[in-house]
Amino acid sequence: MQGHWLYGVDIFDEIDRLQVIVELPGVSKEDISVNVKANALKIVALAGSRQYHRHIDLGVPVRGEPEIHYNNGVLEIMLGKA
Amino acid sequence: MEKKKLKNNEPILDFGLKFGGILTELGNFTQDITKMVEEGKTEMSRTGEISFDKSQKRKGMYGVSVRMGGDGMPRVDTFGRRPESETREPIVDVFDEADRLQVIIELPGVEEKDISIELKDSTLILTAGKGERKYKKEIDLGVPVKGEPKKQYKNGILEINLKKA
C-alpha cells in the first residue's frame, strides 16, 4: 500500500469511450501524471506529503491520448476504446 | 512549532448497521495497522461496501483511515457514504496551534461557492457540495473559538483557521 487510497475510482462505460473519475484532493494539475498501457491506467500525483499512486484496470483496451481534466480535487480522464 | 493533533472527532462507524461483517473487516484492519507500524508507514485506510438487504439494492460505503500522529499515537477517522442519502462524511484534520486551530477538510469535487460552515459553541458544522457530491460533518473542536473563521479553498481542500476564545 502506498500513500493515499482513501478515495474510490468511478469508471463509466460510454459506448465508444471510457470516463474515469478519480478523487485526488490537495494536488495541482501539474503534479499529476497519467499513463495508459494496454488495458491499464496508471495515475501518479506527488505533491509534498500528498502522494497518490493508483493503478486502474480498465477491462477493455483503449487507444489514443487520454483527455484529462482536473478541477476541485477531482481528476476526470476520457479514453477512447480501441 | 510542531503541529499537534486533537482527539478524534467521532466514534468509529456510526452508520447504524449490523456490525458482523464490518467487525471482521476491522479485525483484519487491526492487523494492517500493526503491519503499518512495523513498516514505519504513517497513513493507511480501508474501504468496503455494505449491503443492507438480500436484493443488494441498497449499498453503503464505509471507510476507516488511520494516520500516525507526531506523538506516535494513531488517529482513526471514519469516512464514507451513508446509504440513506448520497451525503458523505469528509476526512477532517484538526491541528492545535497555540492560540488558534487549523481545520483541514477534504472536499473533492465541491465548488467553493457550495461550501458553508457554521460555528455553534465549540462545534464546527460543515455542509458542502450539491447534486451527487454532498458532504456533511459536525466537527467537535474541543475548545471554544471566537471571531470569524478564515477560509481558504484549493484543489478540493478546505482550510479553516479559527482563533481560540
Image (cartoon, grey):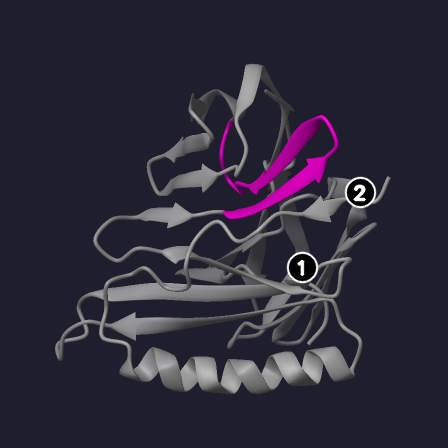
Neighbourhood count class around disc 2 (C-alpha, 10 Å): few under 14, some 14–19, many 20 upward: few
Q: Tell which tag, 2 or 1, sits nearer the viewer.
A: 2
Residue at image point 76% right, 72% down: B41
Q: Secondary structure at mark 2?
A: helix
Give the main secondary structure, helix, strand or loop, of the magenta stretch: strand
Tag 2 residue: A30
Residue A5 shows up from this direction? no
User: Is residue A64 placed above or below A38 in the rendered structure?
Assistant: above
Residue at image point 52% right, 53% down: B8
Query: What amino acid is at disc 1?
Result: Gly
Residue at image point 65% right, 46% down: A68
A43 left or right of A61 in image:
right
Q: Is residue B103 magenta?
A: yes
A79 left or right of A33 in image:
left
Residue B89 shows up from this direction? yes
Please identify the quadrant where the N terminus of chain B is shown: top right
Image coordinates for residue B142, horizontal then vertical, percent: 52, 39
Please identify the quadrant where the C terminus of chain B is shown: top right
Q: Chain of mark 1?
A: A
Image coordinates for residue B106, horizontal then vertical, percent: 57, 43
A23 left or right of A46 in image:
left
Residue at image point 45% right, 25% down: B117
Residue range of the region highlighted in magenta in the rendering: B91-111
Neighbourhood count class around disc 1 (C-alpha, 10 Å): few under 14, some 14–19, many 20 upward: few
Q: Secondary structure at mark 1?
A: strand
Image coordinates for residue A61, horizontal then vertical, percent: 58, 74
Camera-side residue: B20 or A58? B20
Q: Earlier in the sequence, mark 2 or mark 1?
A: 2
